[in-house]
Amino acid sequence: MAASVIKKFFIASMFMWIAPLAILYGFNHNLLPGSSNLSPHAMTLASGFVAVISVNIVIAFYIYMALREPVDKHEPDPKFLADAKASVSQPTGEASTSSESLKKQE
C-alpha cells in the first residue's frame, strides 16, 4: 500500500514539473495552435497562465486520487490503551506537590 502511495506522489510530482515546462516550450516554439499570432507580451502572459493552471489541475487530480485511497480502520494497541487509562485514572496529588516545590524554590 505504501509503495502505491509513493508511486502516485512521484508521478504527480513529475507531472507538476513536466506539464508547465511542456506548455512553456510549446508556446515559445509556436507548437501550440494560435500561439504564433500572439504578441510577445501576450504570449508570455498566456503561457504563464496556462502553465499555472496545468499545475493546479495536477494538484487537484492528486488530491482526488488521495481521497480515493482505501482507509483501513486503525485499531490501537491494547497495552497502550491500558497504560493510557491507568495514567489518566492516577490521582493528581503529585502535580500539586511539584507546583508547591516550584514555589518554594522561587
Image (cartoon, helix red, strand yellow):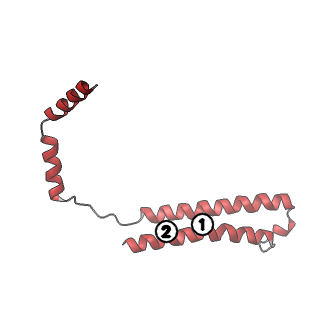
Residue plotted at (39% across, 66% down): 69
Residue designated by label 1? 16
Q: Where is residue 64 in the image (x, y as percent from the top left)?
A: 48, 62
Q: Is residue 59 left or right of residue 23?
A: left
- Considering depth in this image, is 96 or 54 the residue closer to the camera? 96
| Depth order, front residue of 96/6 | 96
In the image: residue 9, left or right of residue 54: left
Crowding at dot 1, Cα within 10 Å, few <14 / some 14-19 / many 20+, comes out as: some
Q: At numbered mark 2, what does the secondary structure look like: helix, strand or loop?
A: helix
Residue lying at 27% horizontally and 61% vertically, measured from the top left: 73
Residue of label 2: 9
Q: How far apart are marks 1 and 2 (CA)?
A: 10 Å
Task: Give x and y (percent) for residue 79.
Answer: 15, 57
Q: Pick the quarter of the image with the N terminus.
A: bottom left
Residue type at tag 1: Met
Q: Mark 2: which amino acid? A: Phe
Judge by depth and name the residue closer to the eye, 44 or 10. 10
Quarter of the rendering occupied by the C terminus: top left
Say few, some or many: other residues with alpha carbon within 10 Å of mark 2 (under 14 / 14 to 19 / 20 or more): some
Out of 63 and 91, give the one closest to the viewer. 91
Residue at the image position 81 percent from the left and 67 percent from the top: 35
The residue lying at 55 percent from left, 68 percent from top is 13
- Determine whether 6 is above or below 85 in the image: below
**Spot occupied by residue 83 in the image (x, y as percentages of width and height):** 15, 51
* Labelled pair 1, 2 in contact (Cβ < 8 Å): no
In the image, taking residue 83 as reference, residue 49 lies left or right, namely right
SS of the residue under disc 1: helix
Q: In this view, does 28 lie above or below 106?
A: below
